[in-house]
Image (cartoon, rainbow, N blue to C red):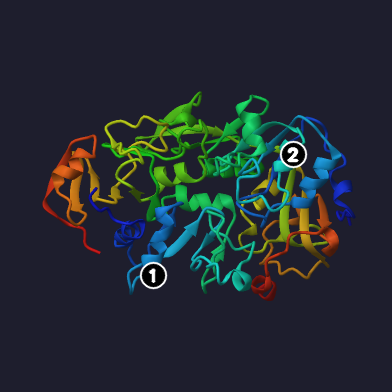
């Protein structure tokens, strides 16, 4: 088996997409890790569905006793820390921020993503149930949607597919897919393979991807 | 002046009838959930309730205290309208999940922003609105679709309730409310969308003690206020020092 990027390195690559002043909403899983790798000199404003902007890092296990506060949590229910300039608002305002297109970047996990950028991520595999949560509002309305995922399922099946086989979160919403072996941009012509994990070739990535990939003329190794 | 202060949670929920529609403020933890009102309603026993809330309780993050999970355990719920109804942990399914899958409880799953806006609209006298969220997904089923600026949108209807159970930090004696941190979430909008809004608060202060600019929920939206007393065993296992100093 060829070596794949760790979840942390995937998060690190996604963090390069952030820009100074960006309003950012991170989903559960790899997306949450992105906040640990914000490039130096860049300051982003985190948004959470439950009504806060501009809060600080998640409270670590060691800090729990001193800093955890039941009235300062993010959308995953994690305790976060206060920052100067932070503000609170109710849920209708929080989703006015999302629906109104004021979130610059959202990073979300993936069950399947299609060649047109359809995203499916809300049903639990094998349970027949799922939680929509804030994911649909984010994918329909954020300015940029980044999908963060392992390239294949645990059984080695492609997660990047021609057509999603599970219920959609939103059609044609994903702009960029960052996996543990490649960076792929969703374009009007199809999926553009732009970056490869160290040691991987375009052919090897194609073998693990259902739709045909377009190889970028400047295809390169992932830079962090 | 109308006296809105009720001495006990039991008294505050006494008149909730069978079949009532109840909005309950909640998100992903104990903060901002009116735990004592929920416990009182469980004891009171009203049945065939419709619960409007972000979750259906017991989602895996909320196992350390009684959220509205106990209303499902007590078989008081007929229908739930929620965005995040299921436990994220397959090994610990919530009581609601079992009842939804068996058909005992009806589920209407709604995107969270649509849920918030339907509640806001209910309180604001807007009968329905269009939103792009949910087009070409399961949420679209049975809804009118109309294009605005070449973008397809769904017609979504307002939600109203007979009761709203809200959690706030402080109330003054006429019912103006302020909230603490992320406690706010659905609470202020639910307070506007119900016939009877009952607020569970840490403190009740005199009129004039809350700064007019700081008030989030105007008093006219609040019908009953109940104070949480120290001896009621709220799981205050966590320090609240940061906020207590600042509000």
How many residues crowd around disc 1 within 10 Å: few (fewer than 14), some, or many (20 or more)? some
Which quadrant of the view contains residue B112?
Answer: top right
Q: Mark 1 lies on which chain?
A: A
Looking at the image, which residue sits at the far front?
A1
Residue B185 appears in the picture as rendered: yes
Whether residue B14 is situated above or below residue A28 in the rendered picture = above
Q: How many other residues sit within 10 Å of disc 2, few (<14), some (14-19) or many (≥20)?
A: many
Q: Residue at (24%, 35%) from the top-left corner?
A: A210
At horizontal 36% and vertical 29% (from top left) the residue drawn is A165
Q: What element carries label 1?
A: loop
The residue at the point 46 percent across, 44 percent down is: A135
Does residue B91 lie above or below B19 as drawn? below
Q: Which of B112 and B92 is in front in this view?
A: B92
Residue in the picture at 36% in, 66% down: A37
Q: Do the residues labelled 1 and 2 touch (CB within 8 Å)?
A: no
- Image side of residue A106 versus residue A134, left or right: left
Picture coordinates of residue B214, whole percent (x, y): 67, 66
Give the percent coordinates (x, y) of residue B141.
49, 25
Image quadrant in which the C terminus of chain B is located: bottom right
Where A153 falls versus A52 (above or below)?
above
Q: Nearer the viewer, residue B114 or B146?
A: B114
Check residue A43 in the rendering and tell me which mark sits there, or answer none: 1
Q: Name the residue under label 2.
A: B71
Quarter of the N terminus of chain B within the rendering: bottom right
Q: Mark 2 lies on which chain?
A: B
Residue B194 can be seen in this image:
no
């Amino acid at each position: 088996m060829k070596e794949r990027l760790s979840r942390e390195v995937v998060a690190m690559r996604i963090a390069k997409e952030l820009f100074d002043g960006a309003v950012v909403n991170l989903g559960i899983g790899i997306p949450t890790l992105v906040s640990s790798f914000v490039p130096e000199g860049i300051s982003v404003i985190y948004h959470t569905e439950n009504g806060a902007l501009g809060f600080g890092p998640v409270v670590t296990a060691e800090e729990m006793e001193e800093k955890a506060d039941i009235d300062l949590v993010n959308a995953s229910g994690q305790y976060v820390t206060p920052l100067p300039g932070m503000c609170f608002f109710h849920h209708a305002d929080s989703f006015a921020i999302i629906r109104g297109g004021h979130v610059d970047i959202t990073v979300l996990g993936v069950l399947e993503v299609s060649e047109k950028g359809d995203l499916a991520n809300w049903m639990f595999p094998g349970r027949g149930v799922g939680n929509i949560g804030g994911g649909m509002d984010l994918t329909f309305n954020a300015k940029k949607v980044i999908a963060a995922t392992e390239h294949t399922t645990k059984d080695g099946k492609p997660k990047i597919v021609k057509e999603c086989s599970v219920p959609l979160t939103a059609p044609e919403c994903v702009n960029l897919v960052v996996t543990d072996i490649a960076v792929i941009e969703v374009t009007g012509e199809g999926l553009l393979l732009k970056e490869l994990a160290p040691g991987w070739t375009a052919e090897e990535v194609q073998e693990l991807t259902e739709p045909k990939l377009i190889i970028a003329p400047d295809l390169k190794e992932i830079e962090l | 002046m109308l006296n809105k202060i009720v001495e006990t949670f039991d008294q505050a929920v006494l008149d909730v009838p069978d079949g009532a529609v109840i909005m309950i403020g909640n998100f992903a933890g104990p903060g901002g959930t009116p735990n004592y009102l929920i416990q009182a309603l469980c004891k009171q026993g009203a049945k065939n309730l419709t619960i409007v809330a972000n979750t259906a309780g017991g989602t895996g993050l909320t196992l350390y205290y009684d959220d509205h999970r106990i209303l499902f355990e007590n078989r008081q719920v007929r229908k739930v309208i929620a965005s995040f109804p299921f436990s994220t942990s397959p090994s610990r399914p919530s009581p609601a999940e079992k009842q939804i899958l068996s058909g005992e409880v009806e589920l209407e799953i709604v995107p969270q922003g649509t849920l918030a806006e339907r509640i806001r609209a209910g309180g604001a006298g807007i009968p329905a609105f269009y939103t792009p969220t949910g087009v070409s997904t399961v949420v679209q089923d049975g809804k009118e679709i109309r294009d605005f600026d070449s973008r397809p949108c769904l017609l979504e209807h307002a939600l109203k309730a007979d009761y709203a159970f809200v959690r706030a930090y402080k109330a003054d004696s006429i019912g103006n409310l302020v909230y603490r941190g992320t406690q706010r979430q659905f609470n202020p909008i639910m307070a506007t969308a119900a016939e009877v809004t009952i607020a569970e608060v840490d403190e009740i202060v005199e009129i004039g003690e809350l700064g007019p600019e700081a008030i989030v929920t105007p008093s006219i939206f609040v019908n009953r206020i109940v104070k949480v007393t120290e001896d009621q065993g709220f799981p205050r296992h966590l320090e609240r020092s940061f906020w207590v100093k600042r509000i």
